[in-house]
Amino acid sequence: MADACRRAGARRLTAVIPYLGYARQDRRTGRRSLGARVVARAISTAGFDRVMLIDAHTPAIEGFFEMPIDHLTAVPLLAAAVKPALADHPVVVAPDLGAVKLAREYARRLESPLALVHKTRLGGQEVEAHGVIGNVANRTPLVVDDMLSTGGTVEAAVRALRSAGAVEPVTVVVTHPILVGRARETLRDLRIARLVAGDTVAAEPSQTPPIELASVAPLIATAIRRDHQDESLADLRADV
């Protein structure tokens, strides 16, 4: 598509990629590929002048691209979506260390305290939680992350929170509801009250488990309009 547009005389090409699927491959372990760098190079070679991403797992992803990156965040719209039905005495929870800055922004917008689950990833789907940092006793947890793929991280976090005295209902908020493998069954078995997510990937709302989708279309539309009018996108960008 980029090549066709360029050959047709396009003056400027912008790639809008709500979910960058290789963003988690930002460091090399063993003999694995540095997938994020490979994809960034392919996008650069295609001839794009600018790239828009939404909550791309790590700010370091910008370093893999050779063109300007608009790293947008869906936190404001997701926080607004979850706030009207927020349970009493909430606590925003980062399910691992990587989600702390994201959780801090949710906590600021929802005016709630913050907690952290200390976890270790044992494999692709197996996660072990070691404890909870912060007071969650008699509070309703709001677990936030950039994505939910297999559900292993959320499962470990929720079990640790309940052991630490957190009370129902449990709400999960993510930007990217990947939901692969047994993710839906895992959420159902955990008795998650709500999963609020962006629609950056193809996902269907459901009642079991309850999945509510919040559209990121207004965010993308605003970013595109401002970009093409050479206006600032500072308040739309992810500082987390």
Image (cartoon, helix red, strand yellow):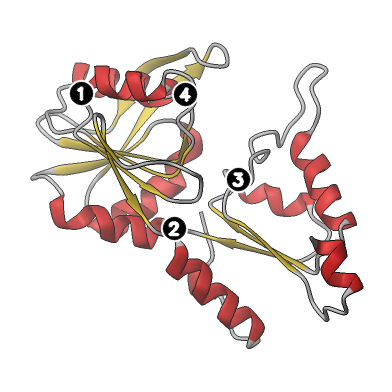
Numbered badge on residue 150: 4
Find out whether the residues at labels 1 and 4 contact each other: C-beta distance under 8 Å.
Answer: no
The type of residue carrying mark 2 is Ala
Numbered badge on residue 58: 3
| Depth order, front residue of 39/165 | 39
| Depth order, front residue of 194/105 | 194
Where is residue 48? Give x, y as percent: 81, 65
Q: Secondary structure at mark 1?
A: loop
Q: Quadrant of residue 154?
A: top left
Q: Secondary structure at mark 4?
A: loop
| Depth order, front residue of 132/198 | 198
Q: Is residue 98 left or right of residue 142?
A: right
Q: Is residue 150 left or right of residue 233?
A: left
Q: Is residue 96 above or below residue 87?
A: above
Find out whether the residues at labels 1 and 3 contact each other: C-beta distance under 8 Å.
Answer: no
Residue at image point 12% right, 28% down: 167
Instruction: Give the spatial CA distance, label 3 vs label 4.
Output: 19 Å
Residue at the spot of label 2: 74
* Front position among marks 2 and 3: 2
The type of residue carrying mark 4 is Thr
Find out whether the residues at labels 4 and 2 contact each other: C-beta distance under 8 Å.
Answer: no
First in sequence, mark 1 or 4: give its number: 4
Where is residue 191? Give x, y as percent: 20, 23
Residue at image point 68% right, 48% down: 60
Q: Secondary structure at mark 2?
A: loop
First in sequence, mark 2 or 3: give its number: 3
Residue at the spot of label 1: 191
Where is residue 58? Give x, y as percent: 60, 45
First in sequence, mark 1 or 2: give its number: 2
Where is residue 143? Give x, y as percent: 31, 37
Instruction: Give the spatial CA distance, label 1 vs label 3.
Output: 29 Å
